[in-house]
Amino acid sequence: MTPHIGAKPGEIAETVLMPGDPLRAKWAAKTFLDNPTCVNEVRGMLGYTGTWRGNRVTIHGSGMGMPSLSIYANELLKEYGAKTLIRIGSTGAMQPDVKLRDVILAMTATTLSTPSSGIFKELNFAPCADYGLLAAAHKASQGRSVATHVGGIYSSDVFYDERPDLNEQMTRHGVLAVEMEAAELYILAARYKARALAVLTVSDHLLTGEALPADQRQSSFGDMVEIALEAAFS
């Protein structure tokens, strides 16, 4: 057990999918895993372990934002021996050719700051995905009904952003979308020699103002979860 995860030794799989919302972790586990068992409920952050095509998988919430994800990812990697962490979450599109419900595979994650910024001091570390996972996810995405985009994203440390000038520059430089967790996930994976990837579903659009209604978000996330699982075990 750790301060934030109540799972016993051996109850966390080496492969962990991490949605931000703990209720989404519950939904994904009960929808995609065989015999899912709840292994964590500390502070309401749900985690489930089951199997997918005979492979052990844990689906564990991360909370919202990089500080929250950093807590859970650190404990999963250091104390429970996780080897592969895949974020499955929503994102806001920043390019006109990216549409609602599209899937984004985050190759890199630009950021202003992360919980790890103090370690690097003046260095601008470049957080990136594990290439093997990225290539496998791209292959798994082919032939699906949703469009898939591969490229850089922006991990923001605020939800209510008031920097339209910054958003304009990121759109200008090809950043596909914005979310709040991937950069720190990639940094921690590099630190602990683990694999990491963010597989994201577009739930809203910064350029058009479009957004999926709440009742459609979850039903649109199935492709993202399946791509993540196939990538993890390909």
Image: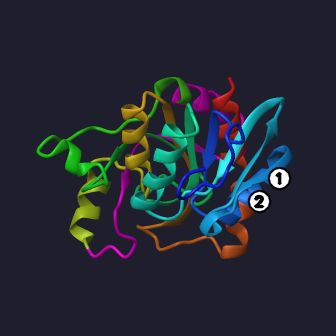
Q: Residue 27 has which mark? A: 2
Front residue of 56/202: it is 56
**Residue ID at (41%, 67%):** 207
Q: Is residue 124 left or right of residue 205?
A: left
Residue 144 inside the magenta-drawn segment = yes
Front residue of 149/198: it is 198
Question: Which residue has dot 1 on it?
Answer: 31
**Residue ID at (42%, 67%):** 206
Question: Residue furthest toward the right?
Answer: 35
Q: Position of residue 39 (x, y in %)?
A: 73, 52
Q: Quadrant of residue 201?
A: bottom right
Front residue of 188/9: it is 9
Q: What residue range appears in magenta?
A: 134-162
Tell me if residue 225 comes above or below residue 83 in the rendering. below
Q: Quadrant of residue 144?
A: top right
Q: Position of residue 86 (x, y in %)?
A: 57, 41
- Kindly identify the amino acid type of the residue bearing the numbered disc 1: Thr
**Residue ID at (47%, 25%):** 131
Tell me if residue 1 comes above or below residue 132 in the rendering. below
Q: Is residue 116 left or right of residue 128?
A: left
* Neighbours of disc 1 within 10 Å: few (<14), some (14-19), many (20+): few
- Kindly identify the amino acid type of the residue bearing the numbered disc 2: Trp
